[in-house]
Amino acid sequence: MMKTATCILVVLSALAVGCGNSDEGDDGGGGGGSSLECSAVGWCTNWYPSVREAQNAPALTGGALADGLYRMEQGSHSIQGLRIQGKSILLIGRSWGNFVGTWKADGGKLTISVAGNCDEQGETSMTTQFTYAFAVKGNAVYLQDLDTEGRPVLLFQKVSSLCEENATFSCSSRVCACVTTTNKPLTGQTACD
């Protein structure tokens, strides 16, 4: 299951949600509040990032992760998103599939402890961890998977909507599809591509 998650979210391969407490330490966590649910955000799209390599990536020495919705815009041709809320994290896949858990930063190392996953088949509990080298630069988060050698640096940009087209993330198909849900089960959702 860990390898599947790593492929689904390459380096983002794991921003998930669980039961986090934003008051744990001073490692750059966002505001307080409750944990994210696995279905807090659902996404289905056939849009892709147009830039395969992260441009101008800083040294992966850490930083303060801010609450918000992020979309991978450089570093891979895969589709990934993440939602950070306090110490909770949601790794959002491109076709109704998420991982949820908590995160902890230690210098330039980000550890995501996954507590569950959900997709169109249902929701299940699971326990695994993903580790990344990371950096924060403005509204961007850079991640590099440390669990699998040779992974690229990925750039996640803070966005107001996962379906917001821009110069580095758009539809290149004849038929374009991008659908999001908020706090709705991912089961029963129809394919968008």
Image (tube, rainbow, N blue to C red):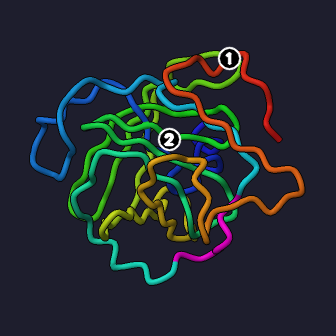
Disc 1 designates what residue? 187
Instruction: Give the alpha-carbon distance from disc 2 to disc 1, as whole Å.
Output: 17 Å
Disc 2 and disc 1 in contact, CB within 8 angstroms = no
Disc 2 designates what residue? 91
Q: Secondary structure under badge 2? A: strand
Main secondary structure type of the part rendered in magenta: loop
Residue found at x 13% / y 37% = 24
Q: Is residue 149 above or below residue 12?
A: below
Q: Secondary structure under badge 1? A: loop
Indicate the quadrant where residue 150 lies: bottom right
Tell me the kind of residue under disc 1. Answer: Thr
Return the disc, 2 or 1, that comes first in the chain's sequence.
2
Percent across and percent down for residue 154 are 51, 66
Q: Is residue 67 above or below residue 90?
A: below
Query: Which residues fall within the magenta stretch?
Result: 48-54
Determine if the magenta segment contains residue 68: no
